[in-house]
Image: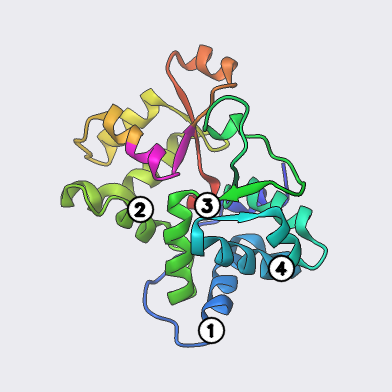
């Protein structure tokens, strides 16, 4: 397992108050450092995903321009944490069908949840998945919106290496007292970039007897 992904099990309390210290990029870098560490790649990652947030995507050429020679390492880090997803795919848009290529002409996009994480981090200096989830579900029933942070925690508890099946999501909903239809909820989580079907995980699907999903690791950071 990548040394970057191995850090994702740490839970850190993240207050939402505005941090007046530093500029927005520094605050974003501080937020990222809680799970990426404090090295040069983290600083460049902050610059790159901040730039991507303007249009929701970024080109390989732009990453090269910003990263000063570390484009491949930064993009690999962003892909490992699902901060950026390659647009190119072999058949469909699910993450495990995306073709991660490091070359001119390639485009990488931000999952919707990451956009909210970035905007919040630039303001507060904290990586706040709870806030991002409530924003994604801002157009839904208030009771559902308020239960989303707890649902994510319950889903994390049922997951193994960020993998969870539909039956486990249903169990997590029951524990979090979420009354939403599970199929509808899964669709909303997919659109939000919180989960993505594991189309190639045939062994997982066979064992679970139900669809299997990857939870975006950056929302578990």
The residue beneath circle 1 is: 23
Q: Are marks 2 and 4 in contact (CB under 8 Å)?
A: no
Secondary structure under badge 3?
A: loop
Task: Using the numbered discs, state the Cα–Cα distance from disc 3 to disc 4 in whole angstroms.
Answer: 17 Å
Disc 4: CA contacts within 10 A as few (<14), some (14-19) or many (>=20): some
Q: Earlier in the sequence, mark 1 or mark 4?
A: 1
Q: Earlier in the sequence, mark 1 or mark 3?
A: 1
Whether residue 81 is visible, yes or no, is: no
Q: Which residues are magenta?
A: 188-196
Judge from the rendering whether residue 102 lies leftward or rightward of residue 216; answer left or right. Answer: right
Foreground of the two, 120 or 58 = 58
Mark 2 in CB contact with mark 3 (< 8 angstroms): no
Q: Which residue is mark 3?
A: 110
Alpha-carbon span between mark 2 and mark 3: 15 Å
Neighbour tally class for label 1: few under 14, some 14-19, many 20 plus, Cα within 10 Å: few
The residue at which mark 2 appears reads as 133
C-beta proximity under 8 Å, tags 1 and 4 = no
User: Can you tell which quarter of the image residue 42 is in?
Assistant: bottom right
Name the N-terminal-most of marks 2 and 3.
Answer: 3
Q: What is the CA distance from the residue labelled 2 to the residue labelled 4?
A: 29 Å
């Amino acid at each position: 397992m990548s040394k970057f992904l191995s850090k994702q099990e740490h839970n850190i309390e993240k207050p939402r108050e505005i941090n007046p210290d530093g500029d927005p990029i520094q605050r974003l870098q501080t937020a990222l450092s809680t799970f990426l560490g404090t090295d040069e790649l983290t600083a460049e990652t902050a610059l790159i995903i901040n730039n991507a947030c303007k249009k929701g995507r970024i080109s390989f050429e732009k990453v090269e321009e910003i990263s000063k020679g570390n484009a491949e390492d930064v993009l690999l880090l962003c892909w490992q944490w699902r901060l950026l997803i390659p647009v190119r795919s072999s058949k469909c848009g699910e993450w495990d069908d995306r073709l991660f290529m490091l070359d001119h002409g390639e485009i990488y996009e931000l999952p919707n949840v990451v956009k909210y994480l970035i905007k919040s981090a630039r303001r507060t200096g904290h990586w706040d998945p709870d806030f991002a989830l409530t924003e994604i579900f801002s157009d839904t029933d208030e009771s559902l919106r308020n239960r989303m942070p707890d649902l994510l925690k319950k889903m994390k508890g049922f997951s193994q290496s960020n993998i969870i099946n539909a039956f486990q999501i249903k169990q997590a909903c029951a524990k979090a007292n979420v009354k939403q239809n599970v199929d509808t909820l899964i669709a909303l989580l997919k659109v939000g970039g919180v989960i993505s079907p594991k189309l190639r995980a045939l062994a997982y699907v066979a064992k679970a007897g139900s669809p299997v999903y990857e939870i975006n690791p950056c929302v578990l950071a």
